[in-house]
Image (spheres, rainbow, N blue to C red):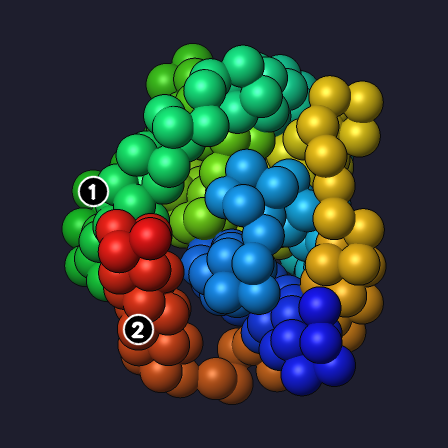
Amino acid sequence: MTVWEAVAVLAAGVGAGMINVIVGSGTLITFPVLLAVGLPPVTANVSNSFGLVPGSLSGVIGYRRELAGQRARLVRFGTASLLGGVLGAYLLIELPSAAFDAIVPVLILLALVLVVLQPRVAKAVAARRRPDGDPHGGVLLLVGIFLTGIYGGYFGAAQGVLLLALMGMLLQEDLQRINGVKNALAMIVNGVAALFFLFTSTVNWAAAGLIAVGSLVGGLVGARVGRRLPPQALRAVIVVVGLAAVAKLLTD
């Protein structure tokens, strides 16, 4: 990488760290930047998984007050996320690269739709909540978190949005406390996928290191100021960058 490419990757890591803590979908910023500096799609995804782990950790630290009293829930959901993340990482390695090239644009477009629809989904979910519901969301939520872990281990973009939508639908809980759990589950998926890739795939350590530094800083900043930032602006950035990634993938 040139100096300016390195700066771009570092800046993308900062942006991704902030967005992951606040909304989710930071991969939609880092992934296209890694493609733009010349990394193959699978290598870019693997390196991105490594780089985002510190940002996930800083997000968990930033939301530690919201996580208080949710230990049992974290163990339950974290186990499902861990198992799903391992399976998703395995599928990424085992599926042929051509299949990944074909699947990624579809996943990005799906993630963008989820990002755009998130406010409406949240309102609909709030209207349907029942005060006597299962405090842990039941088997349906556990299965949903497991499937989201598979998706997160395979690609990861918008797994935070998926988790927020699922938990918001099936948990009787404050949104900020749900967001804290979301950050913890995303850290588990990113971490276990990165560990799996360490022994099974090729990592571009320069790119992973730059994203790691950037996401660590971005996660800390995002946890501090996230509640003050207009979500509409963040969604607009995600959509623009995501569409650019899809365009690049389809034209390469």
Q: Which residue is mark 1?
A: 128
Please name the amino acid that badge 2 sits on.
Val
Give percent across and percent down for residue 196.
Answer: 74, 24
Q: Which residue is mark 2?
A: 240
User: Where is 174 relative to 226, above or below?
Assistant: above
Q: Is residue 224 left or right of residue 95?
A: right
**Which sits in the foreground, 47 or 49?**
47
User: Where is 83 relative to 185, above or below?
Assistant: above
Q: Is residue 222 visible?
A: no
Q: Give the quarter of the image for residue 194.
A: top right
User: Where is 75 relative to 156, above or below?
Assistant: above
User: Where is 103 relative to 150, above or below?
Assistant: below
Which circle, 1 or 2, is nearer the viewer? Answer: 2
Q: Determine the residue positioned at 71% across, 68% down.
A: 1
Q: Give the quarter of the image for residue 185.
A: top right
Q: Is residue 55 left or right of residue 146?
A: right
Q: Marks 1 and 2: CB-CB under 8 Å?
A: no
Give percent across and percent down for residue 37.
Answer: 57, 65
Q: Determine the residue positioned at 33% across, 53% down.
A: 252
Give percent across and percent down for residue 208.
Answer: 75, 54
Q: Is residue 216 left or right of residue 104?
A: right
**Which sits in the foreground, 49 or 205?**
205
Q: Which mark is residue 93?
A: none
Give percent across and percent down for residue 221.
Answer: 70, 78
The mark nearer the N terminus, 1 or 2, is 1
Please name the amino acid that badge 1 sits on.
Arg
**Which sits in the foreground, 230 or 193?**
193
